[in-house]
């Protein structure tokens, strides 16, 4: 069974979990990182020497870094639907993966940070009251 190390609140872990769900893969997610800790444990560092999540173990194949994991899972289990064999088509998907990390994510995290931590009078975006 696929094992995924990482906390639910990690954006990079969320990407991996989303694709895992889309592919219908049986998996076990193991809380690690943030308040769960465990990233400096020798067992974890043996999987990822950088001590970051996400990390997967797919039957003994260890992959770390969210985009490497996405590419691996898509190629292995996607049946061409998520990772095309044609390099030109694959590049179309690949550029969106990178765009999400370099353009979308910083803006998204900035919005979340403002909503959560900035005083309301200094916020660019104010979430509606619940």
Image (tube, grey):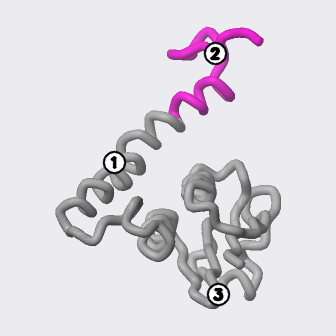
Badge 3 vs badge 1, beta-carbon distance below 8 Å: no
Determine which residue is flagged by label 2.
127
Residue 86 in percent (x, y) is at: 22, 68
Which quadrant holds residue 117? top right
73 left or right, relative to 5: left
Q: Is residue 30 above or below residue 59?
A: above
**Range drawn in magenta:** 110-130
Residue 123 in percent (x, y) is at: 56, 16
The label shown at residue 59 is: 3
Q: Residue at x 78, y 63 (%)?
A: 31
Badge 3 vs badge 2, beta-carbon distance below 8 Å: no
Give the crowd class for mark 2: few <14, some 14-19, many >=20 residues within 10 Å.
few
Give the crowd class for mark 1: few <14, some 14-19, many >=20 residues within 10 Å.
few
Give the crowd class for mark 3: few <14, some 14-19, many >=20 residues within 10 Å.
few
114 or 66: nearer the viewer: 66
Q: Does residue 113 show up magenta in the picture?
A: yes
Q: Residue at x 73, y 9 (%)?
A: 129
35 left or right, relative to 1: right
72 or 54: nearer the viewer: 72
Q: Quadrant for the C terminus, please.
A: top right
Q: Residue at x 60, y 80 (%)?
A: 48
Q: Is residue 28 above or below residue 106?
A: below
Disc on the earlier residue, 3 or 2: 3
105 left or right, relative to 50: left
The label shown at residue 31 is: none
């Amino acid at each position: 069974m696929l094992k995924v190390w990482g906390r639910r609140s990690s954006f990079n872990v969320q990407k991996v979990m989303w694709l895992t769900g889309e592919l219908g893969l049986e998996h076990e997610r193991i809380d690690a990182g943030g308040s769960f800790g465990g990233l400096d444990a020798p067992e974890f560092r043996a999987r990822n020497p950088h001590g970051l999540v996400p990390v997967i173990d797919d039957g003994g194949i260890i992959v770390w870094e969210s985009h490497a994991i996405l590419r691996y899972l898509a190629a292995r289990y996607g049946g061409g639907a998520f990772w095309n064999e044609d390099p030109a088509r694959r590049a179309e998907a690949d550029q969106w993966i990178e765009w999400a990390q370099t353009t979308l994510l910083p803006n998204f995290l900035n919005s979340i940070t403002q909503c959560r931590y900035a005083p309301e009078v200094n916020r660019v975006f104010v979430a509606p009251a619940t």
